[in-house]
Amino acid sequence: MKFSKRLYKKPGDFFDDLRFVLSRPRLVLAVNRNKVISHDFMERLMLAVTSVNQCRYCSYFHTGQALKSGIDRDQITDLLAGEFADCPQEQLPALLYAQHWADTDGHPDAEAVQKLEQTYGAEKAEVISLILHMIRIGNMSGNTLDYFRYRLSLKGEVN
């Protein structure tokens, strides 16, 4: 049985994501205080990326956070399945961007980046990018833990 979850392709990718986050302390504080983006919007973004990267730890944690932010169970299930039909219309462009961002391993098309900035403005687009980098660090770290468990397992399986 082959391990199929997404991992960082090289250590430098992890450090690029970490550097992106750490170089924006003012925005990190804004995200933590829900100053630019609401908590429910942030959790939808986190779940959109997690749906692509399939980190079970992040799925569990952010499902709980999404419930606390007022997102109902059906919508969470849809988000984890990559479905955004019941999401607020004003969040839809960012959720589609987040999915594309994760699908392209954090290297979205220039046109997609430009559309995100046009839709939300420079600051909000940067906050969205920050959130995506943050959840990618979590997703890939969780998946790496599962990879080590997979490698150590006699059956080659991870529960």
Image (cartoon, rainbow, N blue to C red):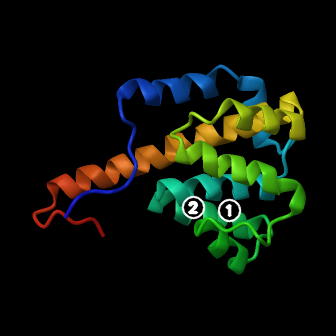
Quarter residue 90 falls in: bottom right
Q: Position of residue 140 (x, y in %)?
A: 44, 45
The label on residue 131 is: none
Tell me the kind of residue under disc 2: Phe
| Residue on which disc 1 sits | 65
Q: For the residue labelled by badge 2, is the local secondary structure a helix, a strand or a loop?
A: helix
Q: Position of residue 137 (x, y in %)?
A: 51, 40
- 94 is higher (above) or lower (below) than 22: below
Question: Is residue 144 found left or right of 156 in the rendered image?
Answer: right
Q: Position of residue 139 (x, y in %)?
A: 49, 49
Question: Is residue 52 found left or right of 76 in the rendered image?
Answer: left
Question: Is residue 16 found left or right of 64 in the rendered image?
Answer: left
Other-residue count near label 1 (Cα within 10 Å), few / some / many at <14 / 14–19 / ≥20:
some
Say whether marks 1 and 2 touch (CB < 8 Å). yes
Question: Is residue 31 found left or right of 148 in the rendered image?
Answer: right
- Mark pair 1, 2: CA separation: 6 Å
Q: Position of residue 89 (x, y in %)?
A: 88, 61
| Residue on which disc 2 sits | 61
